[in-house]
Image (tube, rainbow, N blue to C red):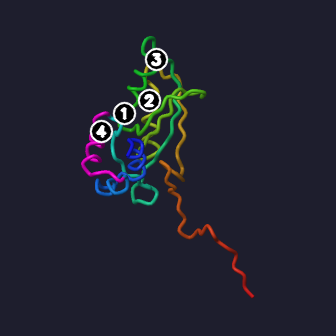
């Protein structure tokens, strides 16, 4: 078993037990347990998450992707500005980009569009160094983390036209 094998396996199914991993990777449970602990200690494994299709739950949530333009700081580049942004609880994920008009892509979550608008207007935009924002509200997610969320139970890939005599 390689580290890549283990990481690839749990990336697709974090719910696997040590016993399942042991059998799938043909390795002892002790080796699996020790490998996971080592990967967690090295922060290679940063957490175990559940992927939820919020559209099918009874919870109202609004997601937005915000493009953030900013000027780098002398000696710190973009890192200090990034830290000021990603420390907010509203921020789900954040990335520094190249080849884009904006330096950061920030994914946020809120209860309403108004709540996200307030986050942008009162917290994000006033940060020193931020020169502009563009907010894109997510209307529907079709696929997330490699998993298709838009499953139409009535759709059949082999759907054929009905022929009646």
**Start-end of magenta stretch:** 26-42
* Relative image position of residue 88 (x, y in whole percent): 36, 33
Q: Which mark is residue 40?
A: 4
Q: Main secondary structure of the magenta part?
A: helix
Along the horizontal axis of the image, is 3 left or right of 31?
right
Q: Which residue in the structure is indicated by mark 2?
A: 124
Mark 1 vs mark 4, foreground winner is: 4
Q: Which residue in the structure is indicated by mark 1?
A: 88
Q: Which residue in the structure is indicated by mark 3?
A: 77
- N-terminal label among 2 and 1: 1
Q: Do the numbered discs 2 and 4 sit on residues whose CB atoms are within 8 Å? A: no
Mark 3 vs mark 1, foreground winner is: 3
Mark 2 Cα-neighbour bin, 10 Å: few <14, some 14–19, many ≥20 = many
- N-terminal label among 2 and 4: 4
Distance Cα–Cα, label 2 vs label 4 = 32 Å
Mark 2 vs mark 3, foreground winner is: 3
Mark 2 vs mark 1, foreground winner is: 1
Vertical placement of 36 versus 134: above or below? below
- N-terminal label among 3 and 1: 3
Distance Cα–Cα, label 2 vs label 3 = 18 Å
The residue at the point 44 percent across, 40 percent down is 108
């Amino acid at each position: 078993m390689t580290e890549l094998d283990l990481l690839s396996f749990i990336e697709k199914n974090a719910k696997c037990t040590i016993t399942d991993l042991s059998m799938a990777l043909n390795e002892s449970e002790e080796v699996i347990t020790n490998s996971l602990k080592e990967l967690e200690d090295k922060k290679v494994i940063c957490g175990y998450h559940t992927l939820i299709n919020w559209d099918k739950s009874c919870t109202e949530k609004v997601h937005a992707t915000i493009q953030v333009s900013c000027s780098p700081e002398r000696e710190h580049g973009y890192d200090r500005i990034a830290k000021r942004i990603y420390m907010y609880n509203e921020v789900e994920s954040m990335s520094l980009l190249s080849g884009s008009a904006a330096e950061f892509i920030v994914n946020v979550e809120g209860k309403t569009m108004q709540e996200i608008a307030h986050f942008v207007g009162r917290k994000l935009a006033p940060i020193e160094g931020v020169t502009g924002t563009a907010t894109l509200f997510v209307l529907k997610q079709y696929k997330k983390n490699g998993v298709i969320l838009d499953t139409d139970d009535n759709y059949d890939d082999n759907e054929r036209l009905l022929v009646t005599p």
